[in-house]
Image (cartoon, rainbow, N blue to C red):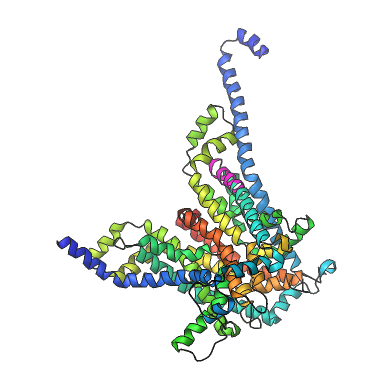
Amino acid sequence: MYIHGKWLAHFPFLKERVDIVEKKKKGMTLAKKQLAAGWLFLTPATILIFIMSFYPIIQAFITSFKTGKGINIKFADPLTYNYSRMLQDVIFKTSMKNTFLYLIVEVPIMLIFAILLAQLLNNKDLKFKGLFRTCIFLPCATSLVSYSLIFKSMFATQGLINSILLKIGIISENINFLGTASTARAIIIIALIWRWTGYNMVFYLAGLQNIEYSVYEAAKIDGANGWKTFWYITVPLLKPTIVMTAIMSINGTLQLFDESVNLTSGGPANQTITMSHYIYNQAFGQGVGNFGYTSAMSFIVFIMVAILAFINLKVGDTRD
Amino acid sequence: MTKKKNRSMIQRRLIPTYIFLIICSFISVFPLYWMIAAATNSSLNVARGSIAFGNQLMVNFANLKNAVQGTLWSSMGNSFLYSIVQTVVTLFVCSIAGYGFELYHDKGKDRLFGILLLAMMVPAVATMVPLYGLVSKAKLLNTVWAFILPGISTPFMIMMFRQNSRNFPPDIMEAARIDGLSEWKIFFKMYVPVQKSIYAAAAVITFMNAWNAYMWPKVVMSDNRAQTMPMFIANISSGYTVDYGMTMLGVLFCSLPTMIVFFILQKQFAEGITGSVK
C-alpha cells in the first residue's frame, strides 16, 4: 500500500488501474469463498452416496465372483460359478417368476384404478371429494409390515374372509388361502393393489390439476362423452406421469420384500417368494451366509433396476 | 329454477360415480377398521369373523406387553428415536445439498449431480450385504447409526430440495452478501424460513419411510433391545399359533404414529410423495 502511494504520487494516472486490481483481488477472494461454500454444502451428501451406494455396489460386483463362507471367501473357479449356479437354482427361478408375475398383473390393474379414481375425483360437481380422497389415500399411512399382517390375518384359514364366504354360502368349508400357491400369490397382488392405488392416485391428481378445466368444457361442447374425454384428453396429457408412476411401481415390485416375508413367509414351500426375500434368506437366514452367491443374485436385481432407472432419466429429460 | 333442475340432474348423473367411490372408499378403510376392531377381540372371536368391537382390549394389551421378552415399549421408543434422528439428519444433509446444487451451480457441480443421480439405480437389496460388512466392521451394529446411515442421503430428497430451490432468487443472496452475511447465515436465516413447507413435506415423507423401514433394520438390528416396531410386530406374528387379537393391537400401535402424521399433515404428505416431480 505504501509503495503504491509513493508511486502513485509520481504517476497519478495509475491510481485508477490500481483500484481496479485491488477490487478484483477482493472480488476474487469473495468469489472463492462462495465457491468453497458451494462445494461444502454438497460434501456430506456426496460422501454419503459414494460410501453407501457406489462403494457397496462395486463391492457386490467383486464379491459376486467369489465363493466360500466367512473368512474362507475366495475367487471362484471358474469366475462365473455363482452366475451359472443361478441358472440351476430352482428357487431363484421361482422367485424371479413370482416377482414378474406380481409385476405384470399388479402394476397395470393398480395404475388403471388410480388414474380412473383421479379422473372421477377431479370432477367439479362431485361432493365429498376430500372425504373420498382421504379414504382412498389412507392405506398409504400403514407400514408395509402392518398391512401384510392385516391381510395375513384376514385371509387366514380361520379368518374373516373365510367366515364371511362360509356365511354367504359361496364355499362349504374353509379354504387355506395362504397355504395354496395360486391363492397366496393372488392375495399378495390384492394386498399390493390395496396399499398402493391411493399412492399413485395422488400423482395423477397432481397431474390433472395442471390440465385446464376449459379443455374439458370444450370437449363437452364438442360432444365428447366421459370415456372419450378420458382416452383422448386425460390419458395423453398425463402420459409423463403415467410413465413415471409405472417405472416407480415396477421398481418397487422388483424389490418386493416385506409382503413376501410377512404375508406368506414366501410359502407354501417357497412358491410365493420374491427375489429380495430369497436373497435375504441366502445371506442372513439360518446357517447360510453365502455372500458370494447372494451378491451375484443381487447384481441381477441391480441390472434390472438400473435399466429402469436409466429409462426413467431419459424420459425425465424429454419432459422438461 | 332451471339452474336448480340442472344441478340436480348433474348430481343424478353422478350417482354411479358416487357408488363406485363409496365402494372404493369402503374397501380402502375396512381393513383398517377391522384391525382396530380385532384389537379389542379375543383371538377366537377374530377367527370367527367378528367385526364388532369386543371387550378384550386390556387382555390383548397385557399379552402384548409380555411378548418378545417385553420389548413393546423399547421397540416403540427405538422407532421414535431412529425415525426422528433420521428425519433431522436427512433434512439437513439433503437440503444443503439441494441448495448448493441449485444456487451455486456450475459445470462441475452439475456433472456431480448427474453422477449422484445414478444412485437411484442401486436397489437396497444389492447393497445390503456389503453395507452389513461395513457397519459391522465399524462396530455400529444395533446402534442408531446403523439404522440411519444408508438412508440419509438419497437422490430423491436432494432432487426435491434442488427443484424447490429454483424459486429462491439469487439477487437476494447477492444483496445479503453485500450486507456482509456469510454463506451459512444466508442459508439458515433466509433460505430455511421461506422453504418451511418443503421442509414439512420432506420431514413427513422421511419420517414415514424411516418408521416403516423393515429389511435394513432386520439386517443390522439383531438385538431384541434395538429392534423397531415393524420388527416387533413381525416377531409376535411369526410363531406357529398366532394370537390375532394381540397381533392386531401390535399392528395398531405400529400404525398409530404414521396415521396421526397422515391425518394432521395429509397435504404435506401428498406434496412429499409427489415432491420432485414438478
Decide if residue A240 is in sight here: no
A144 to B89, vertically: above or below = below
Which one is in front, A216 or A66? Answer: A216
Decide if residue A297 is in sight here: yes
Which one is in front, A42 or B193? Answer: B193
Residue found at the very far top of the displayed protein: A10
Which one is in front, B226 or B275? Answer: B226
Residue found at the very far bottom of the displayed protein: A172
In this image, A132 relative to B66: left or right? left
> Residue drawn at (46%, 71%), measured in percent from left and top?
B30
Residue found at the very far left of the displayed protein: B1
In this image, A125 relative to B26: left or right? left
Measured as percent of width and height from the top left, residue B27 is found at: 44, 72
Measured as percent of width and height from the top left, residue B75 is found at: 66, 60
Range drawn in magenta: B92-104
Measured as percent of width and height from the top left, residue B151 is found at: 63, 56
B94 part of magenta stretch: yes
> Residue drawn at (51%, 40%), measured in percent from left and top?
B193
B22 part of magenta stretch: no
Total of numbered circles in the picture?
0
Q: Quadrant of residue A102?
A: bottom right
Q: Quadrant of residue B99?
A: top right
B147 to A113, vertically: above or below = above
Look at the magenta stretch and give its main secondary structure.
Answer: helix
In this image, A43 relative to A185: left or right? right
Measured as percent of width and height from the top left, residue A94 is found at: 63, 80
User: Where does the N terminus of chain B fall, quadrant-wise?
Assistant: bottom left
A27 to A222, vertically: above or below = above
